[in-house]
Image (spheres, rainbow, N blue to C red):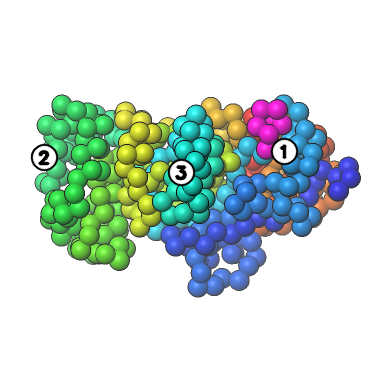
Amino acid sequence: MSNRKLFYLNGKVQHYAWGGYSYIPTLLGLPVTDQPAAEYWMGAHQSAPSLVDEQPLNEYIAARPAEILGQAAADRFGQLPYLFKILDVKDMLSIQVHPTKAEAEKGFARENAAGIPLNAPNRNYKDDNHKPEIMVALSEFWLLHGFLPENKLKAVLREVPEFPRWRPVFDQEGYFGLYKKVMEMPQDEVNSMLRPLAERVLPAYQQHQLDKKDPAFWAGRAIANDPEGMGRLDRGIFSIYFFNIVYAAPGEAVFQDAGIPHAYLEGQNAELMANSDNVLRGGLTPKHIDVEELLKHTRFEAVYPHILKGEAVHNGQEQRYPTPAPDFAISTIVLKPGDVYEHTATSPEIWIVMDGKAVASGSAELPLQKGRSVFAAFGEQYRIAAEVQTVIFKASIP
């Protein structure tokens, strides 16, 4: 690979059950099958590293970290610090919280010491990293994001007929007391409390009478899609009512820091996160839920959702979405026919072409088209010349 610093990158499609069928295969030029394609991973995470020149990206970087990452990133992170994904969310994801860096290190070491295999279903910590993340909507996108502000949550507890018994709990014990109660409640109590709600919202959902801004819509969908049906109601339904329901239009972004409970509900997005697969789940999932661990890492506070619109840089050719995370930065490059974008990579970059046709040239010349991914190592001087209107998402380190 000598002095070359610009490569095609081949990522990995992840076939989780909640994914759609056609969006990711169509983007990548692959056949649509009866297997869901939920995520396309571009990065060096050890569980699914991308390939550059047939070599796993984590191995390519490990051989010459300072040269490929840049000395500063090599010293600070020792590896590619981010993981870049395209998501197609057909069914709701589990409610989840990500740990801080310090807590991830402790949890990972603890589970290793206990001899829990990395791929065990009851494993909470797949690595020792934190997982802040930003998503940029590629379609209309819906998500749950943090606890409702106090006045809104009080209104929910007052107005939803099944919830008044929780009002004194919230008044006396706040967010933590309320969430602890519903998460630790025996399953038969969850069933008896939520059954009247389910019987009320399910017909309205099935008859298309509910708006997506209404938690009843998502509660109805969760019940309709649950193979257990009314038999064992998911306690994640409480979170649908207790959290903010957020809508992001295409091009709008949402940042989720450690400790903010959230769940993706529907749509497609480009997602960039710290290089981690650590997830603590809180419902809407058949997977392992560790309530004690979840309560330890959740931020029990009001969240006022902040939609990021991005800021124009690089003579208006690029839209950047700043976050407080030191691990990653995401931007969109939009070029008109004949436009040329020139840049020197100040950190390792991964790009994915969402639309269009262009040629990237530097230490190699790479024709680009929809679905193509590229890895540019630190210090690469490159130019992208667009033949038609071209849209590229770029991940880097701030």
Kindly check if marks 3 and 1 are in contact, taking CB atoms under 8 A apart as contact: no
Residue at numbered disc 3: 114
Is the residue marked by circle 3 packed among few (<14), some (14-19), or many (20+) residues within 10 Å?
A: few
* Mark 3 residue element: loop
Left or right of residue 207, residue 268 in this image: right
Residue 151 on image: x %, y %: 22, 29
Query: Between marks 3 and 1, how big is the CA–CA gap?
Result: 36 Å
Decide which of tag 3 and tag 1 comes sooner along the chain. 3
Residue under the image location 20 percent in, 63 percent down: 231
Is the residue marked by circle 2 packed among few (<14), some (14-19), or many (20+) residues within 10 Å?
A: some
Task: Give the residues drawn in magenta, as a range.
Answer: 73-79
* Mark 2 residue element: helix
Decide which of tag 2 and tag 3 comes sooner along the chain. 3
Residue under the image location 25 percent in, 50 percent down: 235
Q: Mark 1 is on which residue type? A: Pro
Residue 209 on image: x %, y %: 23, 58
Residue at numbered disc 2: 164
Residue 348 is tagged as 1
Query: Between marks 2 and 3, how big is the CA–CA gap?
Result: 42 Å
Residue 182 visible in the snapshot: yes
